[in-house]
Image: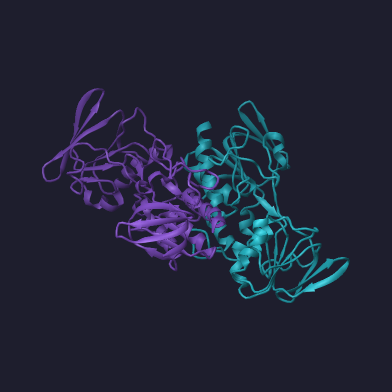
Chain colours: A purple, B cyan
Amino acid sequence: MSYDLIIIGAGPAGITSAIYSARQKLKVLIISKSFGGQMAQKAVEIENYPGFEKVTGFDLILKMENQVKDIEILREKVVKVEKKDNFFIVSTEEGKKVEARVVIVATGAEPRRLNVSGEAGYLGKGVSYCSTCDGPLFKGKDIAVIGGGDAGFETAIFMKKYANKIYILEYGDKVKASLENQEKADGIEVITGAELKEIKGKDFVDKIIFEKDKNKNELDVQGVFIQAGYIPETSFLGDLVDLNEKKEIIVNFENYETKTSGLFAVGDVNCGKVKQIVVACGQGATAVIYGYKYI
Amino acid sequence: MSYDLIIIGAGPAGITSAIYSARQKLKVLIISKSFGGQMAQKAVEIENYPGFEKVTGFDLILKMENQVKDIEILREKVVKVEKKDNFFIVSTEEGKKVEARVVIVATGAEPRRLNVSGEAGYLGKGVSYCSTCDGPLFKGKDIAVIGGGDAGFETAIFMKKYANKIYILEYGDKVKASLENQEKADGIEVITGAELKEIKGKDFVDKIIFEKDKNKNELDVQGVFIQAGYIPETSFLGDLVDLNEKKEIIVNFENYETKTSGLFAVGDVNCGKVKQIVVACGQGATAVIYGYKYI
């Protein structure tokens, strides 16, 4: 099957691209296993998306999804994108091949694993990357959040609803969260200069070991929420794109085009420093308007 | 009075900057005579802003305004911005002087009016300045696009999806659009040397009068898209910024900073080609996150 435009990914950036391409009357296909990206998993209500004083990520993505309900969606996983003459050929894990003149990559990023002992083994048994998903399971428990950026603080603040004692462990000397989030974190114990070394337990997590000032320390916790950043999802692109040191796709900031003509990357998957919903949406709209010129 | 950040203008870009600066706990002042920019004046519902299937510009701006209700607003007109050491001094027509470390200019642009009879009266009743906004309303109708530059041709080409008969009226002897756009304009009737004189109708537009070779001519059309350029609002900035040939502020597309450190320009006032609400919002958020580093 041949399309004008294929959008890979269905978070805020991808959905906005789809909204705009529908208005340009393009023949467009969205390929994504799931809808909503990180937004659907956000721990706290969104208060900085223009137009909504407060909205859950889940509700906002439902509203956006509703705006693209007439667009064809293939719920499969992309494993390869190739360029042949003036067309891109997109292959899915399920064996489908589709082609288009323009491809917009909006695959976002996956939570970064720390690869410490116990992390994989206790996944779903005390280890989580998503407090909105798993928060209620930790009612009355003591938990540690690993990571002192905004995501870590928002996770900890959210978990005040459920957990008993909450720690935030930050590897660096200072937390990186916004002052607003730091102020909301009253009652939460923040430990800086702390490197997680091991997650221990029996059937479930009951302890973490971390190093601080070259000493080993223990905390008795029944939950560990890891918020150590994100890894962009770009493996299927091969050498069609260049990546920066964070493995983000390098784009031209004017139009979000990659080094390959007709191939765009928008939202958290690209090298833009501001990882925010409305910024991802703006990029999604911009790429379509530029991509339209190829078609 | 001294602030961390002054935002000049209160359309979608400026308001989003304000939403983000409040979250960073910055001491911020918005200076704007009115709220909403072009968005508040939109005659038809917005269908391409992510999160709302349909919303009037008026309603959307009210919702955004509600998100900045705790922010100080000075309802005056800026007449001058100067830089002194590491501070900007902003002066208003009403004689106030305020200062800040960072200034975000979000004053937008106004579509250039032709000031012909009927233009103001039929706004939203057949007269439009934005085909992506209003195009679908003209399905099956005959329309005239006023302006034979690229914007006019792109409007006409876009409208082929919806409209029946399409005219382009160009004031000069030759159209100024690129050859590429001219080639795409098959089926569109281009009339050069044509000066629009009047837009007529009853409840809605039904006719335009134009002069060519000193003769008056009529066209029966139900829509008039005026594409006579935009006028960015930059007069108060002096030589703190460079302008392009469209009088838009030249910015670095990564962070929307102008040639002057700490002075940013977001939304329709800058040289970005995609003039859309969600794009302006994304720029407003991005500039604040970068601007925060100065403070």
Residue A195's x, y, as percent?
26, 31
B51 horizontally vs B162: left or right? left
Residue A118's x, y, as percent?
18, 40
The quadrant in which residue B264 appears is top right
Which one is in front, A271 or A222?
A271
A196 horizontally vs B16: left or right? left
The quadrant in which residue B36 appears is bottom right
Question: From this viewpoint, which residue is outermost toward the front?
Answer: A85
Locate the C terminus of chain A by quadrant: bottom right
Which one is in front, A147 or A237?
A237
Residue A255 in view (yes/no): yes
Residue B104 vs B139, above or below: the answer is above
A203 horizontally vs A15: left or right? left
Question: From this viewpoint, which residue is outermost toward the left?
Answer: A202
B174 horizontally vs B160: left or right? right
Locate the N terminus of chain A by quadrant: bottom left
Residue A294 vs A70, above or below: the answer is above
Residue B35 vs B96, above or below: the answer is below
Residue B182's x, y, as percent?
68, 60
Q: Which residue is drawn at the image coordinates 47% and 50% (left, top)?
A: A263
Residue A115's x, y, as percent?
24, 38
Residue B5 vs A109, above or below: the answer is above
Question: From this viewpoint, which residue is outermost toward the right?
Answer: B214
Residue B70 in view (yes/no): no
Question: From this viewpoint, which residue is outermost toward the top?
Answer: A214
Which one is in front, B119 or B212?
B212
Which one is in front, A209 or B3?
A209
